[in-house]
Image (cartoon, rainbow, N blue to C red):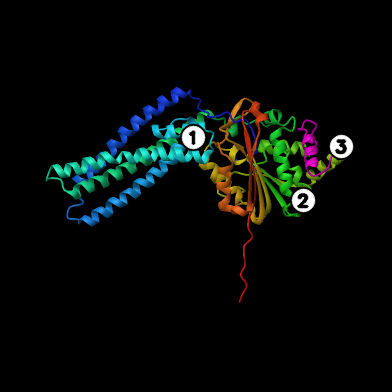
Amino acid sequence: MAMNTGARTGRGPILDLGGTRRWIITLAATAASTYALDAVATAGGLLLVASQIHSGADHLFILVFLASTYVAWGAGLRVNLRENWALLEGTGTSTNLLSKAAYDLVTLRAWRAPARKFAAGAGYVGTEVAKEAPYYAGAFGAALLTDSISANDALTFLGGANLGAAVYEYGLARGVRAFLRRRDARAYAAFETDWVPGEYLADYYSTVEADERRTIAFFVAAMRDAAPGEPVLFFGVGPTLHHVFLAAGKASEIHLGDYLPANLREIERWIARDEAAHDWRPFVRYTLECEGLACPTEAQISEREDATRAKITAMFEVDIRRVDPLGPRDAAAYGTVISAYCADSATGDRGTWETYMKRIAGLVRPGGTLLTAALGRSHGYLVGGKTFPSPNVDENDMRAVLEPCFGRENLTVEACELAEQGSHGYASIVLARAQRARPRFVGNA
């Protein structure tokens, strides 16, 4: 699944619903969800009371039990909050009316993803907490009105209702996740059957566009601090070489990995100097300009191309879906790993993207450097008229996934606004440089 598909067209939500229709769907989903939750929670409470499992238990034990059921309910709610956020970001709909209202209000103010996520979560939790009031009123009201229902019965009912609610939250989350996966399967093209390297190169690499100017300049500057004389890994290189040229002056070897054999064959054509291979000379020229050459000559461009061909010593298939994406190869050998527009171009799911990014980060040895880039706020990009996935991430998401791996002090993240790229349908890219800390050795006293 690892492939560099570039900073490409984000079309907005794949499920393109009108605003009114999204509200109607949310209203219907909220009503259905509320009735279903009440039914499951009430049944859970009644069944637990009917079981008489609490018979003979003292009041303190029942209170502790009730507190523990809130932990279970909170855990289920947390899972559902994550899926509700994915549903809002992907479709603009929700199973909670207040959550959508808060999300839309923050979105209208053009606030970033963390604020939208907090608002959506607060609206959802607020609604669920408010739903607790009728249960308390009903349980303790019944206990006060009739001697046949004790305070312990009321507390046991509430505990059972919480457990029922927890089961419902988990079930709803799984249902939302299944819906999003089915939707994505229908909405996105498949790399294995629909990806055509030639279409991708023709669509996006005829000239050095603004997104790649920013990316190449960022990577060139970052490479000045990279370890010299070591192999450099390009993970998810796709059929492209525009980022590879900047490593030729520093790397002892260049290793190229990608998921699709067709992408690697496209690179092999360029290495073999096939006349039909893609012309990367404009990108070489721009790379040399970023390195400090004001007007690179044709001879200097050819020299960099020849140096790059000589440094490419390995090309192999990789699979980011595996825990060991390089397979049996030595994953700890790389002082520099470059993975541009790879993980975010391989999935439309935010959680999967986070997993993929952590696996790529794991390929960097202690003291080594990771250079990466992602589409900003893209749900999908077009290649040859077909839509491929993107998980709608921004610089805050990038920072959040890389900080635990590298530390805040070793991480640089930049968001580049690209209004001039409006014809491509995306508004920004995210660039990042991260350095893994060296292990600290404690000498013998």
Point out the frontmost of discs 2 and 1.
1
Residue located beneath label 3 in the image: 298
Indicate the quadrant containing the N terminus: top left, top right, bottom left or bottom right. top right
Q: Is residue 331 visible?
A: no
Point out the frontmost of discs 3 and 1.
1
The magenta stretch spans residue 273: yes
The magenta segment is 272-294
Task: Give the image location of residue 283, x and y in percent.
Answer: 77, 36
Residue located beneath label 2 in the image: 250
| Outermost left residue | 147
Question: Between disc 3 and disc 1, whose residue precedes?
Answer: 1
Calculate the distance from the C-alpha at mark 3 to the C-alpha at mark 1: 52 Å
User: In terms of depth relative to the viewer, which is nearer, 432 or 340?
Assistant: 432
Q: Residue at x 78, y 38 (%)?
A: 286
Calculate the distance from the C-alpha at mark 3 to the C-alpha at mark 2: 21 Å
Horizontal side, residue 196 vs residue 153: left or right: right
Tell me the amino acid under the disc marked 1. Val
Horizontal side, residue 139 vs residue 89: left or right: left
Q: Residue at x 29, y 41 (%)?
A: 132
Q: Residues within 10 Å of mark 1 (few under 14, many from 20)?
A: some
Question: Between disc 2 and disc 1, whose residue precedes?
Answer: 1
Q: Residue at x 87, y 38 (%)?
A: 297
Q: Secondary structure at mark 1?
A: helix
Image quadrant where residue 263 sits? top right
Task: Give the image location of residue 12, x and y in percent.
Answer: 55, 29
Residue located beneath label 1 in the image: 106
User: In terms of depth relative to the viewer, which is nearer, 47 or 308?
Assistant: 47
Q: Is residue 105 above or below residue 81?
A: above
Task: Give the image location of residue 315, x and y in percent.
Answer: 70, 44
User: Mark on residue 27?
Assistant: none
| Outermost front residue | 109
